[in-house]
Image (spheres, coloured by chain):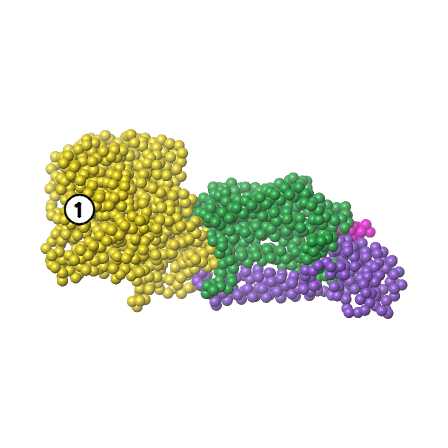
Chain colours: A yellow, B purple, C green
């Protein structure tokens, strides 16, 4: 069976096999019989699951679930199902590789309109979350397990009491990206005239953004930013590439523009931030500014632009008496000039939860005519909808006690909220507190009713990240435990006739998505939609009306207020809560793959660390790993220090998502001590109806003691070695060290096709690390835990080296994915005494695990240090049978004492070769490696180096191409393309204007 | 041993305390036409070989042959492994990477040469584990492995003049003369 | 005869105050026939317990994994290979003294050759230990040998220096063992004739029925000469091949053409240091100062001085080559050795190996037991650190700065090092109890020649 993905062939859902036969059936409801079949199946599944779970046996451990019709599952053959990722609200398209009824690998869905085939680290790791041994396994009431019937009964009675008592019913949820889910929840709330409050913890797309557009356009919406059309991107403390609401889609568009640079001219990206973010690391130019300075810069930019564009007068006037810019004056003026030069082709974004700044940014985009081009308001982003003031309202009404029932959906506000303790107490007092989650979170612990929810890969769902983009997700496996889809629970509680969420979903699609489709057509349409994971073709955008340009009054008012805001004081220390690429808001902080993923910037794993500028560290007298206590207001956190060049001297960046109390020992991996002193959310402040995560006045003091950071990389400079390059333009040639051509003492070797070769474009690579986790998932790479990581015994076959170049306080950051270079003259092969590593005819440097005796000579002799040794029996640590399900059956699990390394995903190469030969094809270079497939930036090309045409050849021909340590004559099979830093200013196709 | 020709006769032993005297005695006796069969000593005595007229040993040939066998054999084996039986692309090097084969070839040459030398010596001189009991018969004096030196003179019927022998040996200053130590 | 030989025999005798052949036998053999003294028991106890520590540490390693050591993804070799090279080096003096000095007709070797050869055997045993236990899967160590198997065509990779090592070390061990035994056969004969009962049977067996016949002596001396002729190139080849482990790699600080001579010189250096240390103890314990005289020690001190300057030359040449090559990686590696995190180890090595031996320019110090003893110990420390520098400091900062790392040994590794010393001294102490620690047939030969010369001098 081929591994080559073909998402066009419809997958056979457990019963869509029946759907096409719909027509012959009674026309009412198209495939009604199917539904019943499905319902019966679910019942049986549920029952058996419960029964078996009850006696502590997990039916899914069987290779093939008995209840799955045999024709759907061929043992040992992978089937690919299209779906949607539910690891975060971004709802990227995914395709799951399912073996014997269990998903073993998640890939991006190339057909997805937004993510375009990429899948981030968190998405990749969602598979591990499915097989997480510490998931909630069955519903519970007041701590003791119950059946769903009992739970529903209990909830209903309570609800009636609450209603009788005339108290509020509230659902607190992270943004509901799923229209059907939204409808389900809303209809439930309608039944009890309750309210839905959406809130997403952590930075990124803050509430102020939507409030700004509410003022500006009358609708609290977040526009959709399209970086692919932006010649000039200016980001004020925003991190859309790394930890924004939709990093994959934004990265895809950002990288698309950069990849197009050869034809469309060099883009330019200016980042203005206080702490080094992934986006900042990828900027052409970086300014260091505190939050207050950023606000001022935004306003100044606005006033300068307003002055020089028609219709901006009112704005300009409102901004009179703006505080002086100081050191930034000249730069701001220049930047304003650049923005004007790129009218309609620029993009300004801000990550501040500050109305003034967001308003300024919104107006900038409007005045510059970016709206409708790079800023889309007609089809905005639906990924974040909550408004902080609603959350604030909830908290107050909780305190005042006029809330009777609170349903917490997928969130953990007790630990991911500003005032956890108070909330916890309030939950305890509530007549009805329901936690709907798949983890034993602190919130779940505080709620009496815990409705154990499905994992996303077990449940049905649809998603609408922005109008016109509708995707579906389907169960990739039978539920592992006696859990239930979160929204199905709501159906049960609201007492609607159809409590089967899948049917509910189909009903809604019949009505809203395919209105007027005949039953028969619907069956087909539905099948097609499920098969492809999304509806083909854009759906009519729901009345994307021209927006009412908000009345000038409130706008200028707000601006004036912002302008009058206290000017930035320099030396004051401020805390900024940041999200890390691996953990984001922390809802997946329990996944070993993510915890062990070294942060692309700090290069630390497992342990949280406060990022401190070198100068500040010197002042505080601390060095890497020293414990430091940061106080902001009443709250404080204590973490190890990580000295970060590129950090503003008076900004302390503190990652959120750590220190969760449900961060129980991760199976097989020693987790670091999870003191709640590491929970940065405690520092967040609800102020004036806005949740402040940055610019928090703070004080810091070394608290004595150390928490050694498991740093994967200790040396951050290149020590003047030509191992990585950055150039000023896309035409510039890299002057790396090279051996003269044809200098080969060993004589030529036959080079039959294919000769595998990989090209990595460092200019597109953002360092997001999706590839690292993808590689880990694909190749069964062990997680070794904090202690071993601290000993530099990381097992990652693919790592992302990070180098600082230039200015020590604000350096250029370079990322270099480093993997086995599959050298033609591999030094490792020659020295192996038992020939356990040898060369294949298609140019692969093969590692024969069962021949390896573990002398480690090969690793010593590897100039790239990409070989990894099994110091212990890592695989044995994965004891939980559920968690072992994550292992990819196509890849050997290595035992103690053997060497391992990147294989260019040889299992995929072989599968594709076999497939090609079966089909009598000559070429099989269409195969993709795991890292390449996951890359949202499409930075990796892979194929046969004998082919003169194609993406790979094109990349290798570029002047920026170079090979690492080629001068050693090892003939590496990986080509890198140098990163371009555009200092001159953008040369977009409209760059000539003005 | 010593391997005496299958002749009839009596074997006399002259015991000395000093290698010089021993050597002188051997020269004298041979000069006077006596038949000195062998000399036992705790360490080799310089000039004894010539005095006894022993011919040069050919042990070195064994060494040479052993060395050649080991070296060429191993070279052939390695070549066979990497070229004929198991050709493999290892580090992009040619199958017959001759320089890489030299070290092992050399080591094996030395090893086999050593075996050949020692083996030939032991077999040639009948050196293999025995009990002392057999040996007692061959050593004319218990201290020839310590600090005594024994000269063995063979008396054949006819040509041997006992009187002359006694006079002469007395003049050579032996510690003791064991006449007829053994009758063959 | 070379200058040293002349000056020696001419000026002062190698064996003091003509003890007579019987006395030599008596003193050397006597010590075997009597009961061991308290000194011996004390030493044996210490050595054996050290060996015990090693056994435990190795057991732990094999049971749990190489992870019990301080190694990491960047530094794949640490104490293990350092100890390996160190012990192989020690194992060179023995064969050098018995073989090369025999060819050079250096008669002063006769008193010390036996002990030195024994030292070789035991040192090589210690060395051979490490290639086995440093493997991730030591139970598969036999895969290192080319043996016919049922896994289809499957042989070893004869291009790998590790395979060369396997052959070099095993050959060296075998040949040294044969040479050692060959030398002992006549002495076993003597012991056989001195002892009674079981001992006699055993020595009788070991002596292969040795008689002292002139014919046997003739072949025997020839065989010894041939073996010496074989062992001499062998001894040079072994450490050359060990140096190939590093020289043929691509890692700066390893990939160095100077290594073979540099390693051999180092081996002789450390080997002689160890011989001095051992013999100064042995001769004291066994009261055979008149056999192993200050002259012998002085000769070896001179060898230390010479080889010490040889390695010193090698060190400086390395530095020069690194600078002269203009290769940034090469340059950095040596800057890093001298100034990096392991600089202390580098300078410790430099002092012990280059500066310390300089004291042996002075005859007075060459004769001072204390100076000689401490000096030889320091040289051994220095030589251990030489290997540590080569193995670890080259690895821990190689080509890609991103993977630079640091290596700190664990207790397990230290335990194994201690254990290897335990093994060495246990074996040596047992040896002095069961076999003649001085080759007395050779010594008597020397005595005979000495008398002859005396007579000539008189005449």
Residue range (magenta): C444-459
x and y, in percent, of residue A855 in the image = 48, 53
Which chain is home to disc 1? A
The residue most toward the left is A516
A814 or C191, nearer to the observer: C191
Choose top left, top right, bottom left or bottom right for residue C169. bottom right
Residue at image position (84%, 58%) is B177
Residue at image position (19%, 54%) is A39
**What is the number of callouts on the image?**
1
| A158 sits to left or right of C321 | left
- In which quadrant is the N terminus of chain A drawn? bottom left
* Prevailing SS of the magenta stretch: helix
x and y, in percent, of residue A961 in the image = 34, 54
As displayed, is residue A769 above or below residue B9? above
C363 or A990, nearer to the observer: C363
Choose top left, top right, bottom left or bottom right for residue B70. bottom right
x and y, in percent, of residue C407 in the image = 46, 44
| C70 sits to left or right of A530 | right
Residue at image position (73%, 45%) is C290
x and y, in percent, of residue A714 in the image = 40, 43
As displayed, is residue C64 above or below residue C206? above
Q: Is residue C81 magenta?
A: no
Residue at image position (64%, 48%) is C430
Q: Is residue C457 magenta?
A: yes
A674 or A89, nearer to the observer: A674
**Residue C384 visible in the snapshot:** no
| C59 sits to left or right of A72 | right
**Residue C422 visible in the snapshot:** yes
Residue at which label 1 appears? A491
Label 1: which secondary element: helix
Choose top left, top right, bottom left or bottom right for residue C188. bottom right
């Amino acid at each position: 069976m081929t591994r080559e993905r073909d998402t066009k062939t419809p997958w056979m859902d457990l019963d869509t096999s029946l759907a096409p036969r719909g027509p012959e059936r009674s026309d009412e409801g198209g495939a009604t019989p199917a539904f019943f079949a499905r319902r019966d199946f679910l019942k049986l599944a549920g029952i058996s699951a419960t029964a078996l779970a009850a006696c502590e046996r997990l039916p899914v451990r069987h290779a093939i679930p008995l209840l799955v019709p045999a024709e759907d599952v061929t043992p040992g053959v992978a089937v690919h199902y299209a779906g949607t990722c539910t690891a975060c609200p971004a709802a990227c398209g995914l395709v799951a590789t399912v073996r014997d009824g269990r998903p073993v690998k998640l890939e991006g869905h190339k057909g997805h309109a937004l993510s375009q085939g990429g899948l981030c680290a968190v998405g990749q790791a969602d598979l591990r979350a499915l097989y997480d041994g510490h998931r909630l396994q069955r519903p519970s009431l007041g701590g003791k397990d119950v059946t769903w019937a009992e739970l529903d009964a209990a909830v209903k009675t309570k609800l009636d009491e609450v209603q009788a008592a005339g108290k509020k019913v509230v659902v607190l949820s992270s943004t509901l990206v799923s229209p059907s889910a939204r409808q389900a929840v809303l209809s439930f709330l309608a039944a009890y005239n309750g309210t839905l409050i959406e809130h997403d913890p952590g930075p990124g797309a803050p509430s102020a953004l939507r409030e700004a557009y509410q003022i500006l356009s009358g609708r609290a919406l977040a526009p959709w930013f399209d970086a692919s059309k932006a010649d000039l991107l200016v980001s004020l403390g925003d991190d859309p590439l790394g930890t924004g609401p939709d990093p994959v889609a934004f990265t895809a568009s950002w990288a698309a523009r950069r990849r197009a640079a050869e034809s469309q001219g060099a883009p330019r990206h200016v980042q203005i931030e206080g702490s080094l973010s992934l986006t900042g690391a990828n900027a052409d130019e970086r300014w260091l500014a505190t939050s207050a300075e950023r606000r001022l810069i935004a306003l100044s930019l606005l006033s300068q632009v307003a002055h020089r564009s028609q219709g901006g007068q009112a704005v300009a006037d409102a901004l009179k008496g703006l505080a002086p810019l100081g050191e930034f004056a000249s730069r701001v003026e220049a930047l304003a000039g650049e923005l004007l030069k790129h009218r309609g082709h620029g993009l300004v974004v801000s990550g501040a939860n500050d109305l003034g700044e967001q308003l300024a940014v919104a107006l900038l985009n409007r005045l510059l005519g970016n709206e409708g081009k790079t800023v889309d308001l007609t089809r905005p982003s639906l990924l974040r909808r909550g408004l902080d003031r609603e959350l604030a309202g909830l908290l107050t009404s909780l305190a005042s006690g006029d809330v009777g029932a609170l349903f917490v959906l997928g969130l953990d506000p007790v630990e991911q909220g500003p005032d956890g303790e108070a909330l916890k107490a309030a939950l305890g007092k509530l007549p009805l507190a329901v936690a709907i989650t798949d983890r034993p979170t602190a919130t779940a612990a505080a709620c009496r009713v815990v409705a154990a929810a499905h994992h996303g890969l077990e449940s049905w769902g649809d998603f609408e990240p922005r109008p016109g983009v509708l995707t579906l997700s389907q169960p990739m496996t039978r539920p592992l435990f006696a859990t239930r889809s979160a929204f199905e629970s709501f159906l049960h509680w609201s007492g609607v006739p159809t409590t089967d969420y899948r049917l509910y979903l189909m009903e809604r699609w019949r009505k809203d998505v395919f209105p007027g489709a005949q039953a028969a057509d619907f069956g087909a349409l539905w099948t097609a939609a499920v098969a492809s994971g999304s509806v083909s073709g854009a759906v009519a955008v729901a009345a994307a009306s021209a927006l009412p340009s908000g009345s000038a009054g409130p706008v200028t008012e707000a601006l004036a207020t912002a302008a009058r805001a206290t000017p930035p004081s320099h030396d004051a220390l401020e805390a900024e809560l940041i999200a890390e690429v691996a953990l984001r808001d922390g809802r997946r902080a329990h996944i070993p793959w993510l915890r062990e993923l070294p942060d692309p910037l700090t290069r630390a794993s497992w342990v949280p660390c406060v990022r401190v500028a070198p100068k500040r560290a010197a002042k505080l007298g601390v060095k890497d790993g020293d414990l430091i206590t940061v106080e902001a207001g009443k709250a404080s956190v204590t973490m190890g220090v990580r000295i970060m060049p590129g950090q503003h001297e008076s900004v302390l960046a503190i990652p959120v998502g750590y220190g969760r109390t449900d961060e129980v020992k991760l199976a097989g991996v020693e987790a670091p001590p999870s003191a709640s002193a590491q929970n940065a959310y405690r520092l967040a402040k609800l102020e004036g109806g806005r949740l402040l995560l940055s610019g928090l006045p703070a004080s810091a003091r070394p608290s004595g003691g150390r928490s050694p950071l498991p740093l994967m990389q200790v040396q951050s400079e290149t020590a003047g070695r030509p191992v990585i390059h950055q150039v000023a333009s896309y035409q510039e040639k890299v002057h790396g060290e090279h051996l003269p051509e044809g200098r080969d003492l060993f004589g030529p070797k036959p080079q039959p096709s294919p000769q595998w070769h990989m090209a990595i474009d460092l200019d597109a690579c953002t360092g997001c690390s999706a590839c690292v986790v993808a590689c880990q998932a694909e190749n069964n790479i062990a997680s070794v835990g904090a202690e071993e990581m601290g000993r530099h015994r990381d097992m990652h076959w693919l790592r992302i080296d990070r180098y600082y170049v230039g200015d020590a306080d604000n350096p250029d950051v370079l990322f270099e994915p480093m993997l086995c270079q599959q050298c033609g003259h591999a030094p490792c092969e020659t020295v192996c005494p038992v020939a356990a590593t040898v060369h294949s005819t298609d140019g692969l440097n093969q590692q024969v695990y069962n021949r390896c005796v573990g002398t480690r000579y090969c690793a010593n002799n590897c100039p790239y240090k990409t070989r990894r040794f099994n110091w212990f029996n890592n695989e044995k640590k994965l004891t939980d049978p559920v968690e072992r399900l994550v292992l990819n059956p196509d890849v050997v699990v290595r035992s103690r004492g053997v060497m391992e390394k990147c294989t260019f995903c040889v299992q995929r190469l072989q599968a594709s070769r076999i497939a090609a030969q079966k089909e009598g094809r000559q070429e099989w270079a269409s195969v993709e490696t795991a890292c390449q497939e996951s890359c949202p930036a499409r930075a990796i090309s892979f194929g046969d180096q004998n082919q003169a045409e194609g993406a790979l050849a094109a990349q290798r021909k570029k002047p920026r191409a170079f090979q690492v340590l080629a001068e050693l004559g090892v003939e590496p099979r990986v080509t890198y393309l140098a990163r371009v830093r555009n200092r001159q200013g953008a040369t977009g196709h409209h760059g000539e204007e003005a | 041993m010593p391997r005496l020709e299958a002749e009839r006769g009596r074997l006399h032993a002259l015991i000395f305390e000093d290698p010089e005297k021993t050597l002188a005695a051997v020269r004298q006796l041979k000069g006077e036409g006596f038949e000195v069969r062998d000399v036992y000593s705790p360490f080799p005595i310089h000039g004894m070989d010539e005095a006894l007229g022993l011919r040069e040993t050919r042990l070195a040939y064994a060494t040479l042959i052993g060395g050649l066998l080991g070296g060429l054999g191993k070279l052939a084996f390695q070549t066979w492994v990497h070229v004929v039986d198991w050709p493999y692309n290892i580090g992009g090097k040619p199958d017959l990477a001759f320089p890489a084969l030299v070290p092992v070839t050399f080591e094996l040459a030395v090893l086999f040469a050593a075996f050949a030398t020692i083996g030939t010596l032991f077999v040639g001189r009948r050196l293999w584990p025995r009990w002392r009991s057999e040996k007692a018969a061959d050593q004319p004096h218990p201290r020839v492995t310590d600090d005594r030196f024994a000269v063995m003179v063979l008396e054949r019927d006819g040509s041997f003049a006992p009187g002359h022998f006694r006079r002469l040996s007395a003049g050579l200053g032996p510690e003791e003369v064991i006449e007829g130590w053994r009758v063959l | 005869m070379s200058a040293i030989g002349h000056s020696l025999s001419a000026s002062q005798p190698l064996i003091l105050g003509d003890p007579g052949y019987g006395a030599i036998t008596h003193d050397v053999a006597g010590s075997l026939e009597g009961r061991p003294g308290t000194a011996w028991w004390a030493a044996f106890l210490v050595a054996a317990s050290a060996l015990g520590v090693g056994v435990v540490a190795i057991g732990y390693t094999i049971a749990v994994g190489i992870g019990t050591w301080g190694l990491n993804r960047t530094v794949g070799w640490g104490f293990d290979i350092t100890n390996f090279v160190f012990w192989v080096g020690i194992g060179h003096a023995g064969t050098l003294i018995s073989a090369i000095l025999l060819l050079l007709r250096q008669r002063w070797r006769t008193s010390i050759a036996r002990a030195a050869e024994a030292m070789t055997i035991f040192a090589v045993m210690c060395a051979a230990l490490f290639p086995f236990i440093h493997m991730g899967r030591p139970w598969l160590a036999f895969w290192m040998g080319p043996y016919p198997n049922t896994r289809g065509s499957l042989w070893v990779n004869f291009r790998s220096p590790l395979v060369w090592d396997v052959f070099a070390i095993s050959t060296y061990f075998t040949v040294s063992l044969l040479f050692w035994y060959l030398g002992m056969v006549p002495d076993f004969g003597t012991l056989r004739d001195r002892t009674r009962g079981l001992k006699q049977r055993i020595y009788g067996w070991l002596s292969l029925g040795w008689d002292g016949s002139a014919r046997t002596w003739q072949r025997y001396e020839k065989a010894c000469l041939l073996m010496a002729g074989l062992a001499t190139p062998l001894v040079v080849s072994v450490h050359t091949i060990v140096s190939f482990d590093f020289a043929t790699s691509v890692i700066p600080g390893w990939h160095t053409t100077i290594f073979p001579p540099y390693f051999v010189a180092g081996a002789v250096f450390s080997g002689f240091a160890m011989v001095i240390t051992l013999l100064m103890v042995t001769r004291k314990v066994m009261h055979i100062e008149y056999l192993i005289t200050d002259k012998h020690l002085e000769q070896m001190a001179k060898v230390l001085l010479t080889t010490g300057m040889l390695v010193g030359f090698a060190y400086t040449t390395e530095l020069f080559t690194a600078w002269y090559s203009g290769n940034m990686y090469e340059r950095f590696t040596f800057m890093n050795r001298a100034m990096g995190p392991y600089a202390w180890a580098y300078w410790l090595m430099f002092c012990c190996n280059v500066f310390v031996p300089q004291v042996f320019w002075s005859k007075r110090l060459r004769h001072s037991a204390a100076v000689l003893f401490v000096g030889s110990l320091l040289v051994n420390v220095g030589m251990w650190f030489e290997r540590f520098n080569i193995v670890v400091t080259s690895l821990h900062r190689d080509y890609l700065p991103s993977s630079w790392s640091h290596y700190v040994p664990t207790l397990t590794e230290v335990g194994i090092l201690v254990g290897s010393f335990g093994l060495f001294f246990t074996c040596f102490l047992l040896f002095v109890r069961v076999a003649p620690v001085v080759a007395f047939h050779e010594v008597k030969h020397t005595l005979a020649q000495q008398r002859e010369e005396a007579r000539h001098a008189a005449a």
